[in-house]
Amino acid sequence: MEKLLDTFTAYQNGKLPDQNGYILSVFYHESSAYTRYELVSFGNVKDIFANEDGLVFQAEGRKLYVLVEPAGWPTSHIEPAYRTDAERVPYRFKEMIDFTTGRRDHVYIGSNPVVTYTSFTVVKPVGQNVSYVFYPADNVKDVILEFFRLSLWKQARVPQSDARRVLTPIGEVFDKMVVGEGGFH
């Protein structure tokens, strides 16, 4: 079985996990390295259907948000929860881990997952944005963290050594959202 597939291709081909899994969506800013990551772990799936915005999961979910903000970002003084839709994550600064890179860029990591009890929507990627489903496996954490490392380094332009180091806090928050056969742990 594949380790990851494009989320919407997997849906169209009937290959989305029907009990539990992980979906990572990445939203790139059009003209900078500003990048938002949304990782959802889901379980207890009742239904999955498409609407005009994306895929609606009637399931329990836990979301981890990671935000890469380049040095000198013009709205860096505004709480992430109050920014424009394209820049927003549902946290205030005090609810996030701030990892500052050697270049003075910031990688913000939500310190706790956001819990959704009944449903959530995976937004359809537009332009260069992407969304991948990761299948449940013993090494799913390692696969997701390696995806983060490569994406942070190559797409979000975080220096390679910093991209490796930021995996530690991302992995710690990931451990709070692990889902298995019986639901969340």
Image (cartoon, rainbow, N blue to C red):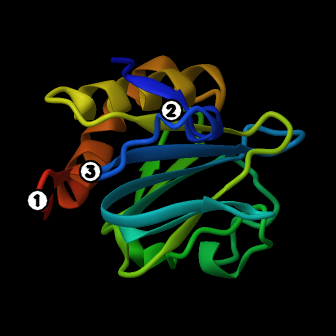
Few, some or many residues within 10 Å of mark 2 (<14, 14–19, 20+): few
Q: Is residue 90 above or below residue 101?
A: below
Q: Identify the residue at image location x=25%, y=31%.
A: 140
Residue 141 x, y percent position in the rendering: 24, 35
Quadrant of res 51: bottom right
Name the secondary structure under disc 1: loop
Residue sitting nearer the eye, 172 or 9: 9
Name the secondary structure under disc 3: helix
Quadrant of the image containing the C terminus: bottom left
Few, some or many residues within 10 Å of mark 3 (<14, 14–19, 20+): many
Disc number placed over residue 174 in the picture, else none: 3
Residue sitting nearer the eye, 126 or 93: 126
- Mark 3 and mark 1 lie on one chain; the one further toward the N terminus is 3
Q: Distance from label 3 to label 2 (Cα)?
A: 24 Å
- Mark 3 and mark 2 lie on one chain; the one further toward the N terminus is 2
The number of numbered discs placed on residues in the rendered structure image is: 3
- Mark 1 and mark 2 lie on one chain; the one further toward the N terminus is 2
Amino acid under disc 3: Phe
Residue 177 x, y percent position in the rendering: 24, 59
Can you see residue 70?
Answer: no
Amino acid under disc 2: Gly
Residue 17 x, y percent position in the rendering: 37, 43
Q: Is residue 125 above or below residue 3?
A: below
The residue that disc 1 covers is 182
Q: Identify the residue at image location x=34%, y=31%.
A: 145
The residue that disc 2 covers is 102
Compared across the picture, whether 172 is left or right of 110 comes to left
Quadrant of the image containing the N terminus: top left
Q: Are marks 3 and 2 in contact (CB under 8 Å)?
A: no
Compared across the picture, whether 94 is left or right of 86 comes to left
Q: Distance from label 1 to label 2 (Cα)?
A: 42 Å
Amino acid under disc 1: Gly
